Image (cartoon, rainbow, N blue to C red):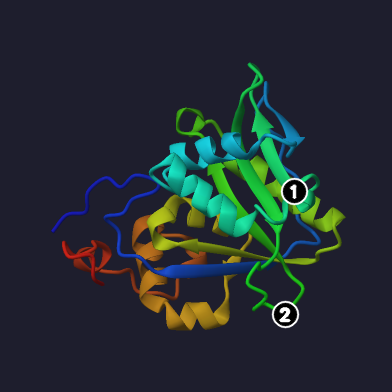
Amino acid sequence: MALPAFDNHDGRIKYYELMLEADITGMAEIPLPEGYSYVFYQDGDRDAWIEIEKSAKEFSSYEGGLDAWGRYYANRTEELYNRMVFVVNAAGEKVATATAFYDIRGIDQSGDGWLHWVAVRRDEQGKGMSKPLISHVIQVMKGLGYTHAKIPTQTTTWLAVKVYLDLGFRPIEKNFIRCRDGWRIIKRLTDHPTLKELTPAADEEVIRSEDGSL
């Protein structure tokens, strides 16, 4: 079977949880395209965050966004003022976001920073914004005292995984072993040189079955 042209967030791809990490001490900032700028979260930005994430297909409805906000940030809004970043376009619209955070479950005891909820509004994608945004939030992390960062992601956002690899993040060893087939999917879809040791997934291993199972 031939693979279809996948979207950058595509539920047709078999789902595996992926984790990346990197020493961020030497990571440099990449400038935004002309006409864009950064602002931190301010009171009332919850719905702007939801709309960006919904547009990027992180969830399908406003209610889904409210649920995600409730789980991640509703009880931590005082921390967002110097952690949640938005990209603003020339018209003053918030069009992208990412957050310098940590493992809210409390499972990761390493003290590492976690990059949360990276998203670019659908109509602003493809304009070279994601790498600058991520690199800027990495600088925010460093300003907060972090020297190492982790990124939770998944095979269904395969293009985002490629961006993280391009920026120097690498699979966490335990995740690489446990979700090897997921990383083989990323190898098949991106042919990223950092995954050269992997055999690419066969086409039939990439597509999610109709019943949603692996």
Q: Residue at x 66, y 33 (%)?
A: 87
Crowd tier of the residue under label 2, counting other residues whose Cα lies within 10 Å: few below 14, some 14–19, many 20 or above = few
Give the residue type at disc 2. Gln
Residue 97 rendering spot, x and y as whole percentages:
62, 41
Q: Which numbered marker is on residue 80? A: 1
Q: Residue at x 71, y 46 (%)?
A: 84
* Closest to the observer, 176 or 93: 93
Give the residue type at disc 1. Leu
Q: Residue at x 26, y 72 (%)?
A: 214
> Residue pushed farthest top?
91
Counting residues from the start of the chain, the first of labels 1 and 2 encountered is: 1
Q: Residue at x 34, y 44 (%)?
A: 7
User: How many numbered marks have been drawn onto this rendered protein structure?
Assistant: 2
Residue 211 rendering spot, x and y as whole percentages:
17, 65
Q: Secondary structure at mark 1?
A: helix
Q: Which numbered marker is on residue 109? A: 2
